[in-house]
Image (spheres, rainbow, N blue to C red):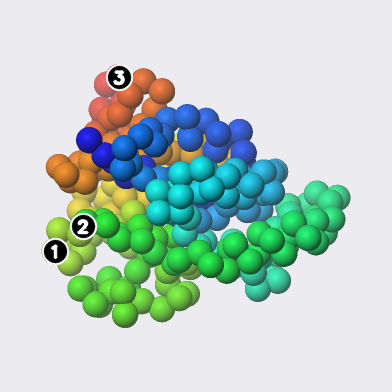
Amino acid sequence: MNYIYAMSDIHGCLDAFEYALSLVDFSGDSKLILLGDYVHGPDSYGVLKKIIQLQNKYGSDKVIALLGNHEEMACDGRWPIGGNGDADTYAHPEEDNRYLMWMQTLPRYYAEGNTIFVHAGIEEEAEDLWEWGTDDFTFTEKYPAQTGRFYGDRKIVAGHIGTAEISGNPRFHDIYFDGESHYYIDGTVLESGRIPVLKIDTENNRYYRVTETGARLILPYGEDLRRKERG
C-alpha cells in the first residue's frame, strides 16, 4: 500500500528533520510532502541541502516541497536565508543564489485525492473553485487558522500556525485535527524540538500520526488528548 507523508515548519532544525525523515517509508509510490518554512533556524542551509538531496534521489514528484512564508521572505529580500542571528548570516552569497532560485520554483499548494496540502490555507468560501479563488498571500500567510467543515469531503493539511496556539494548549505540539476538515501539523519545532509526521492512507481516507512506535489514527483534538491521558 502506498501512502502520503507530510511535515511542515522545519525552520533549520536539521536534527529534528533527520529524525522525522527516519519515520518515512519511501518505498513504492509513497510520497513526502513538505509544507514550507524550511529556513530561519539553527541550520537553514543544512535543511535546504537535505531537501534537495532527497528530491535528487527520489524525484521532485515523490518529494514535493511547497513554498512557505519564510521562503517568500527570503526570496523578497526581507529576511536572508541565514538570518537567525548567526555571524555568518550574509556569508553564503553563491549558496544563497542557488537556494533562492530553487525556492522561486516551489508551488504554493498540492492536491491529491480529497486532500489539499498548503502552507497556511486556502480561500474556503470559494468551495470547489478554491484553486482560482485563493490569492498568493492566503496560500502562505493565512491567519488565523480556520476550522470547521470545508466543501464536500475534502481535507486541508496545513502548517504555518503552531498547534499549541490553535489548540489553546501551550504544551500541545502534535497534529491538531478539528474533527471536520482540517489537519494542522506545525509542532513549533524551535520550541518543542519536534516535527510531527502525518501519514495518509489515501485509499481508505485515514490519517495517522507516525512515531517510533508506529502509526496512530488521529482523533479530533479533545478525543485525542483524552486518549493520551489514559495512556
Residue flagged by tag 1: what amino acid is it? Gly
Query: Which is nearer the eye, 150 or 31?
Result: 31
Bin the neighbour count of mark 3 within 10 Å (Cα to Cα): few under 14, some 14-19, many 20 and up: few
Say which quarter of the image contains residue 200. Answer: top left
Bin the neighbour count of mark 1 within 10 Å (Cα to Cα): few under 14, some 14-19, many 20 and up: few
Residue flagged by tag 2: what amino acid is it? Asn
Of mark 1 and mark 3, the one earlier in the sequence is: 1
Of mark 2 and mark 1, the one earlier in the sequence is: 2
Query: Does the residue at mark 3 contact the one at mark 2 (Cβ under 8 Å)?
Result: no
Q: Is residue 102 above or below residue 220?
A: below
Secondary structure type for disc 1:
loop
Question: What is the number of the mark on residue 114?
Answer: 2
* Residue on which the image places disc 3: 231
Q: What separation in Å lies between label 3 and label 2 (alpha carbons)?
A: 32 Å
* Residue on which the image places disc 1: 152
Residue flagged by tag 3: what amino acid is it? Gly
Query: Does the residue at mark 2 contact the one at mark 1 (Cβ under 8 Å)?
Result: yes
Q: Nearer the viewer, mark 3 or mark 2?
A: 2
Residue 166 appears in view: no
In what quadrant of the picture does the N terminus appear?
A: top left
Count up the numbered dots.
3
Secondary structure type for disc 2:
loop
